Amino acid sequence: MSQSVRRSAYIFLCAFPFVGVGFVSVRPLRIAGIFQTLGVFLFIAVAIAAWLSGPRKVDLKGEGRWKQALAGLVLIAPSAIISLLWVGLGPPFQATTSENYMRFLVLVWNSILVTIGFVLTRDVLNDAGERVCSAIGLATALIAGAAYLICLNLSLAQTALALHGNRTQPPAIIVDFYSAIEFVACVMTYVTTAAFATAMGRVRLLGRTAAGAYVTVAAVLGLLIIVRGLAYPEISANTAPWYTRPGVIAGIPAIPWLMPYLLGAVLLRRTRAD
């Protein structure tokens, strides 16, 4: 396989989650037959790009190599799953109750995948001799993963009740608790990304400039959430569009996983076989 093909596939792989966000956001695409076809096409495209941009083969006898490839694939998987299932889904207020149930179910399982990916990445970095930043990243990844599981399962349970006709609004204390846990989940994911990017820079899996860029972007996005405040903002037809509100964008549950996806693409790209 030529280097130009691998490079092109890698560029597409890195651009893919941002392309996916566009397809997910356009509600008019949610037409039976169309969104399923587009979802399958996007999923196959990212699978092919991952295969082309990664190593030609992975020696399963070399534990470090297949562990690195697996870490990359697991971190990429959430965006691939979202692109498969969410074409035209739009924000929650535009989706049906059954669509929102599927939305939160996907988010729950994706939070688990991201946490597994971070744990595998920590092992890869330990094998390379980096133990300080990766330890910080592991601690914050576990906090973020636990927080995600709590807040997303709350949303899933509320949506399940709505599916059965119970649309009673949760007590204010539950709403406040959700906001606090979601805040922790997103901020800790950005901290985790910065820690692992720094660690990858120290072992030359990332260049110094690239590692610095990851840290900077993660810090800016985390700061946007902090400035936004603890309360989860309202997203509805009566508010300004979500895509015009930076603090809202940074705190959408799936958005903090975009940079871990990119780290996964780097891990996959840097996996080498003899």
Image (tube, helix red, strand yellow):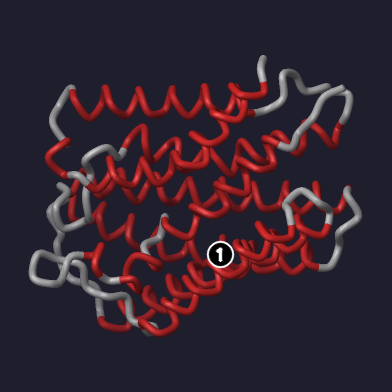
Q: Residue at x 27, y 37 (%)?
A: 87
Q: Is residue 170 left or right of residue 118?
A: left
**Farthest residue in the left direction?**
238
Is residue 229 depicted above or below 64 in this figure? below
Count of numbered tags: 1
Q: Which picture quadrant has residue 251?
A: bottom left
User: Could you tell me residue 120's position as x and y percent?
Assistant: 73, 46
User: Relative to the observer, which residue lies in front, 255 or 170?
Assistant: 255
Q: Residue at x 36, y 62 (%)?
A: 252
Residue drawn 17% across the image and 36% down it: 29
Amino acid at pointer 1: Thr
Residue 202 appears at what percent x and percent y?
82, 59
Residue 61 point in image, percent of width and height? 88, 23
Task: Name the residue located 30 percent from the left edge and 77 percent from the top edge.
Answer: 175
Question: Quick check: 49 above or below 220?
Answer: above
User: Residue extending furthest right?
Assistant: 129
Query: Which residue is under mark 1?
Result: 189
Work out whether 265 lies above or below 44. below
Q: Within the image, what quadrant is residue 139 found in?
A: bottom right
Q: Nearer the viewer, residue 28 or 96?
A: 28
In screen coordinates, is 241 left or right of 49?
Answer: left
Tell me: residue 37, above or below residue 192. above
